[in-house]
Image (cartoon, coloured by chain):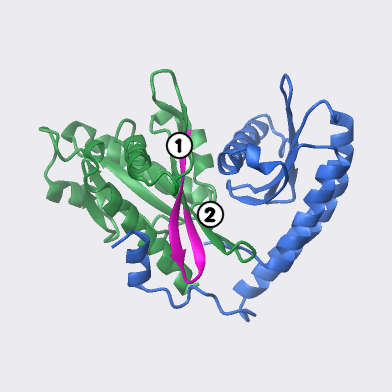
Chain colours: A green, B blue
Amino acid sequence: MTFINYASREINCKIVYYGPGLCGKTTNIQWIFEQANPDKRGKLVSLATETDRTLFFDFLPLDMGMVKGFKVRFHLYTVPGQVFYDASRKLILRGCDGIIFVADSQKARMEANIESIANLATNLRENGFDVRTIPYVLQLNKRDMPSAAPVAEMERLLRFRGEPMIEAVASEGTGVIDTLKAAARQILMELQKN
Amino acid sequence: MAKLDLIMFEEEYKLLHEIISRLQKDASAKVVFLVDKNGQQIASAGDVKSIDATSLASLTAGNVAATDGLAKLIGEKEFSLLFHEGEKDNLHISIVGKRGILVVIFDQNSSLALVRLRVKKASKELQEIFDQVEQRAQKESDGGSRFESPFSEITDEDIDRLFGD
């Protein structure tokens, strides 16, 4: 749910990074945080356990610049990927404008990726959204891993609606901005339609 | 898909701002924030510079969402009020209607009783404005929008520019 404020001439969009545990959701937004101009980014809030696993969410506000005289601001959220945090994951999807699904390229994690997409579909539905129509990007992360599955195989298993698919190594920043941009494009084009 | 964007016009924003400014003074509070349940800040009053408002909005919404989840677990509809007591500053969080959260930060210059009393009154007024915003949004989604969206002509170039291309 985009928040358009005509008084302050601002549009706020909420983008959620989803995916199985340890797939690199937090790494994506950490990299964005480190690279962003300090004037344009807010504080990175991480609600994590002592071992740096996401407990509730990470949050990063980003000022993107102006579109048609409106200041565009993205609120980036990650969900906790571990299976047993499902109740928290559901809450974070509330009012989201777009989803970035971060898939772990390692062969051993393929089942976890598939399960996580199914879980996303369920949780979106419970929040009144449809996984087939909401702005959505698939990121194939950890492409540098020796045990990475071939892209074609991942596409066959994980891509279900012709969504933008981006190869990434989030720890090095490869593909991170392209992923965000693909999501932003869909969200802003959605505003155009409405 | 039941998805209505929250669109706030100048006149509605002004009314909301007036109400929370009054609340901030009447309750002798340090700061008052009005936040959307999805974590977006709508309006604020008082000494806002001292606080990272964006993080506050997002964390408050997370807090309320988690408490909502807890309420449902034990068979309650919601907990309409949260209170956090600190050594110096206290946080009073209450739900306004379906989509708003009112956050009042106060210290020893005020009291929980006073804040509760004033919040109750302000909530009613805020609720009316939210209802108006909702009704307008509903009308517009049913057809017959009274304004031309500035985003109807957004282009690929506009989006590239956001990313500095």
Estimate how packed mark 2 is, as few (under 14), some (14 to 19) or many (20 or more) residues with alpha carbons within 10 Å.
some
Contact flag, marks 1 and 2 (Cβ < 8 Å): no
Q: Is residue B80 left or right of residue A78?
A: right
Dot 1 or dot 2, earlier in sequence? 1
Query: Residue B110, image x and y in percent?
Result: 85, 31
Helix, strand or loop status at disc 1? loop
Q: Which residue is mark 1?
A: A44
Q: What amino acid type should be assigned to the residue bearing mark 2?
A: Gly
Viewer-side residue, B97 vs A160: B97
- Report the predominant secondary structure element of the magenta stretch: strand
**Mark 2 — on which chain does it sit?**
A
Residue A128 marker = 2
Q: From the viewer's perspective, is the residue at label 1 or at label 2 nearer?
A: 1
Viewer-side residue, A158 vs A170: A170
Q: Is residue B164 magenta?
A: no
Magenta region: which residues?
Answer: A57-73
When asked about the image quadrant of residue A77, the answer is: top left
